[in-house]
Image (tube, rainbow, N blue to C red):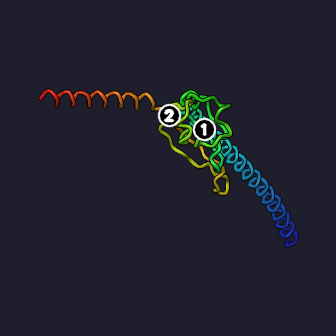
Amino acid sequence: MPTSAVLTHAATNCDALRRLSVAMDVTQQRLEALAAAGQLAHDITDQRRRAAESEAKVRAIERAQATTEFDLDGKMISANDNFPRSTGYSLREIVGQHHSMFCSPDHIRSAEYRAIWIQATYNPIVDLTGKPVRIVKYAFGVTEQVQLTENVTGQISRWNCAAKSSR
């Protein structure tokens, strides 16, 4: 084969290889884009699953416990349905009020006072920068348990006094 024919054939093959290489690069880019889209879809699905799971946990807490939210000054912003049931106050009576309304000395001495016992935790809610924006209190009523304990303690005390006086 003459040299010019070999060179033409090599140039043609080189050109074909370049086109094939470009096509392979485009295919590779498309595959990478599809993989990234698949990963993105997986990430979004995973985020949605985690968000749904977190929401379900919050709903479970809301069903099980009395929950109220306060602003950073201690004023009540909201409460779930369990909170008024546990305390005997309506939402209208507590929203906008400072949480100290449940334990102020004047209120305790008033005719409106109701002895309420709760076991609670106060938890800060933070924004994306980590700055506290409000407080959530998760609580459950233990008034009945406290009253039962007081009754049992009183009964035991009476038994002890009776036993001492019979000696």
Q: Quadrant of residue 100?
A: top right
Query: Which comes sooner in the sequence, label 2 or label 1?
Result: 1
Q: Amino acid at mark 2?
A: Phe
Which one is in front, 44 or 10?
A: 44
Q: Which residue is mark 2?
A: 140
Distance Cα–Cα, label 2 vs label 1: 11 Å
Q: Residues within 10 Å of mark 1 (few under 14, many from 20)?
A: many
Q: Secondary structure at mark 1?
A: strand
Residue at 56 percent of width and 40 percent of height: 106
Q: Residues within 10 Å of mark 2 (few under 14, many from 20)?
A: some
Q: Is residue 10 left or right of residue 119?
A: right
Mark 2 vs 1: CB contact within 8 A = no
Q: Position of residue 9 (x, y in %)?
A: 84, 65
Which one is in front, 87 or 135?
A: 87
Q: Which residue is mark 1?
A: 68
Q: Position of residue 147 (x, y in %)?
A: 40, 29
Residue at 11 percent of width and 29 percent of height: 167
Q: Is residue 79 left or right of residue 27?
A: left
Q: Amino acid at mark 1?
A: Thr
